[in-house]
Image (cartoon, rainbow, N blue to C red):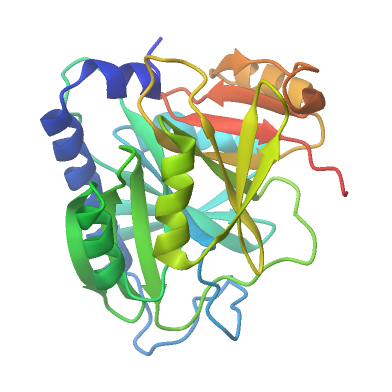
Amino acid sequence: MFTLGRFMQSTSPSTRRAWLLSLAATVAVAAGCTTPTTVVPPKGMAISTTPLVGKFVWRDLLTDNPAAVKPFYAGLFGWQYEERTAMGRPYTIIKSGGQYIGGIAQAERQVPQQPNSQWLNYLSVPDVDQAAERTRVAGGSVVLAPFDLPKIGRAAIVIDPQGAPLGLMRASFGDPADSPEPVMHRFLWTEQLARDPAAAAKFYASLVSYEVLVHDEGDKVFRVLKLGRERAGIMAMPFGNMQPLWLVSVMVADPAASAQRAKELGGRVLLTPRMDVRSGSVALIVDPNGAVLALQKWTPR
């Protein structure tokens, strides 16, 4: 069974870059051609009155086979879809409880006979051009140079100094508003699995002025990036042969039951809930086309 870790490990940097570039082009075209004629928030999205710099504001599932994964996520989370077409290319809006939460973009395979799929997270930054250049200077690279999304804003796609793909975004109409409390079956948390967590935290603190909170649990150190509220985490990669990535989680009531359901729907379970991993509140799964996703139960502090 294919996994993102295997793809990112077994393919060359040039192949991974080509894959991301093809995906980025799809996202840019689709997003730019499905917007309203004036700069107003999209219907189905609550918008903050002030920019929420440091928040992950959008997620795209980038895959060569959207048809294989849409029933999976609909069956697992009850997600609904709105189909769009832009310049002959399909782009799907994901809705949860009537709210837009992400998209699904199609791209070509770069490795024959090997499916590929990945969640790409977009980070709200004050200035996309400056953030892309800072990423390059710090040792990362720019996959898709800053570009305008008509009636939406400006975006770029980079690979950060750790080697993790990331979208950068500055929306003209504002960022998706924070919910007072997390919402079931919507995105809950984002964290980087990094080769050097300390260096990663330092880079992101310089990029968007995060406060870095360090939680030392003896054999494990977990870093939280905070700006206004806790926005993301950084931890060491659990497996030495993985490539760094930003891992996204979806809120569920019962991670074990949801992981079992994912398996029944054609996915695969990488990690079942264990008490030595965040008190059994997290499961890791792979969707039918290879995208890694966390299932997480949220408990108020």
In the image, what residue occupies the spot 34% across and 70% down? Answer: 34
Q: Give residue 275's position: percent from left, percent from top.
A: 80, 18
In the image, what residue occupies the spot 46% across and 22% down? Answer: 288
Question: Going by the image, does 5 lie left or right of 99?
Answer: left
Q: Give residue 65's position: percent from left, percent from top.
A: 33, 32
Q: Which picture quadrant has residue 144?
A: bottom left
In the image, what residue occupies the spot 27% across and 71% down? Answer: 130
Question: Going by the image, does 130 lie left or right of 187?
Answer: left
Residue sitting farthest toward the top: 1
Q: Give residue 213's position: percent from left, percent from top.
A: 65, 51
Question: Going by the image, does 271 lie left or right of 239?
Answer: right
Total marks placed: 0
Against 140, residue 49 (above or below) is below
Question: Going by the image, does 177 lie left or right of 15?
Answer: right
Against 57, residue 301 (above or below) is above
Q: Does any portion of residue 86 appear in the rendered image?
A: no
Residue sitting farthest toward the bottom: 38
In the image, what residue occupies the spot 85% across and 43% down? Answer: 299
Q: Which picture quadrant has residue 164?
A: top left
Quarter of the image with the N terminus in it: top left
Q: Give residue 69's position: percent from left, percent from top.
A: 46, 32
Q: Does any portion of residue 18 appear in the rendered image?
A: yes
Against 253, residue 58 (above or below) is below
